[in-house]
Amino acid sequence: YAFSEFQSESKLFNGSEKDISLSSSKLTKKESLKVQKKNYREEKKRATKELLSTITDPSVIVMADWLKIRGTLKSWTKLWCVLKPGVLLVYKTPKNGQWVGTVLLNACELIERPSKKDGFCFKLFHPLEQSIWAIKGPKGEAVGSITQPLPSSYLIIRAASESDGRCWMDALELALKCSSLLKRTMIREGKEHDSADTTHVSLYGLLRANNLHSGENLPLNDSEIERHHFKDQDMYSDKSDKENDHDHEESDNDGLGKSEESDSDTSERQDDSYIDPEPLDIKETTYLEQSHEELGEAGEAAQTEVVSEENKSLIWTLLKQVRPGMDLSKVVLPTFILEPRSFLDKLSDYYYHADFLSEAALEENAYNRMKKVVKWYLSGFYKKPKGLKKPYNPILGETFRCMWIHPRTNSKTFYIAEQVSHHPPISAFYVSNRKDGFCLSGSILAKSKFYGNSLSAILDGEGRLTFLNRGEDYVMTMPYAHCKGRILYGTMTLELGGTVNITCEKTGYSATIEFKLKPFLGNNDSVNQISGKIKLGKEVLAILEGHWDSEVTISDKKTDVSETFWNPTSDIKQRRLPRYTVKFEEQDDFESEKLWQQVTRAINNKDQTEATQEKYVLEEAQRKSAKERKLKGEEWTCKLFDQDSVTGEWHYKYAE
């Protein structure tokens, strides 16, 4: 019955039914085409309606259970997976309806995957590395719940046991090969149930109903199912399906000896059973637009600090505490050189032009995508305080939150950071704009060295930018800050130095940028210079030249054409995304602005004595807490971030 019904519908779709053929022969060619188009539109609507009905009907379920899915950050997350005919729906929880994404099974292949971890591993993937995700949820959701980033063209899934895993594979094979028959049969069986408790049709009942358990061949093939039930590609395909870059290598490495098999699994610490959480009355955080912002001027003069006479004695006191080669992280610095904000706040300076990343996420060409990423990277440096200023060293457990609103895409980029270690001082951060399709995470170990008549602040660590719909990671490093001059006489100048790298393993594109220190006999034009290259493998495609706080030009190696690549003109600065910070009254006690409020107030009032005293109070409280934990044998537990025990990387807990 199912097969004959399908043949009838298929003929209707193709306009080849006898009565239509007889009537069409009497019509003109134009009228015949009009009839065929009408039939096509009606059939397309019917197929779409049938699929939507199957997805949204709670009684039509092949299987549903907790599975662990590996993200692009190579850690595992436990998610609620619901298998329906033709689709795999992924949720954060089974009852709250927190939709994460929908996998279109008609585009997928399925294979078993070796794994050293417990359980049973298998992989859903698109053979041509195209996206396997739908762009809308079962209720029309445009944006899914926030988890760790998931790959675009494949999913690696782990069931709790081999028997569970093989059951899932059998069910997925069924859903892959006979989704049309599944839909029809399950809808009929589902209607026979008086499902007040929404009892779903079991997989095994379905097998019996269609004599599939005995191994009989199905009357439908993959191409017929795809043609019949997935014709509306505009509704059920991901935007990234239009990618023209087919030469990308899959970021998933199947080697068993790699770190991927010893990835951190935050869900491993949890019991496999699921307990319904109590409903929470969550109040939305209030963000207020930043009222004042200091950008600084281009050139060396804006980076030079002349110490006043009353503060020179503090410089001499500081010099008595240090010796060449010494790490300055444990040295108490005078407050007159402090910028009145935390280092966690300082790290957010790179996202005032996060709209460049929104553009990059939509860019189809991999080379142009890399150029937009480099442009965004350079846009984070021109904002600088006047003179030589150093932000506060964050207190252990200190946090900072802010966001930027994108007027063009009507989206928000959220930033959150935490001081996860005090000795050594490590700051972890996470940035996310799920609607525009990117997130960024990383950690920075701040180290400083004294060289006698100069000192350097080294930012050791890396950031990882991920384009969610492409499964691409861009790993980047940071330059160091170098302070030189006549320290003994109270004149100091700040520069940036070192070579940074931005690499995307999947596409093969990379960029290298050298931040150059001013040479001994250099002129004003040699201040803040940079030079760089954008490469594909070892081939140099473009050369960058200019200054990190003003204009940078790019020269194409093939065409030999040079043009302005980046220039923070007054017009560009006016188009910066507005930043919003958490309302002061709603901040926790350990959020940066509230934690350092007394020190900031004293510095703004130019009261160095009070600023030093208030700073000492905070630092002494931190030392006291550390001693108490040591006596009790307790270890510090971070609020927002977890450290991977294998790689040492820090991951935002709530991104998963």
Image: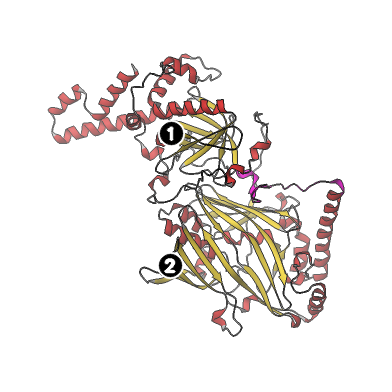
Which percent across, then down, holds residue 359?
Answer: 46, 56
Give above or below for 90 relative to 362: above
Element type at marker 1?
A: helix
Rendered-image quadrant of the N terminus: top left
Horizontal side, residue 153 vs residue 145: left or right: left
Residue 38: which quarter of the image? top left
Residue 457: which quarter of the image? bottom right
Three-letter amino acid code at the position of disc 1: Leu
The magenta span reads 631-656
Out of 265 and 89, give the one closest to the viewer: 265
Which percent across, then down, holds residue 227?
Answer: 32, 32
Identify the residue position indicated by label 1 in the image: 105
Label whose residue precedes the other's in the sequence (2 or 1): 1
Q: At 44% across and 52% down in the image, what residue appears?
A: 362
* Label placed on residue 351: none
Which percent across, then down, holds residue 156?
Answer: 52, 38
Whether residue 346 is in magenta: the answer is no
Element type at marker 2?
A: strand
Out of 639 and 288, give the one closest to the viewer: 639
Three-letter amino acid code at the position of disc 2: Ala
Out of 498 and 6, give the one closest to the viewer: 498
- Residue 334 in sight in this render: yes
Count of marks placed on residues: 2
Give above or below for 31 relative to 9: below
* Label placed on residue 542: 2
Q: At 75% across and 54% down in the image, what residue appears?
A: 396
Look at the image and name its color scheme.
secondary structure
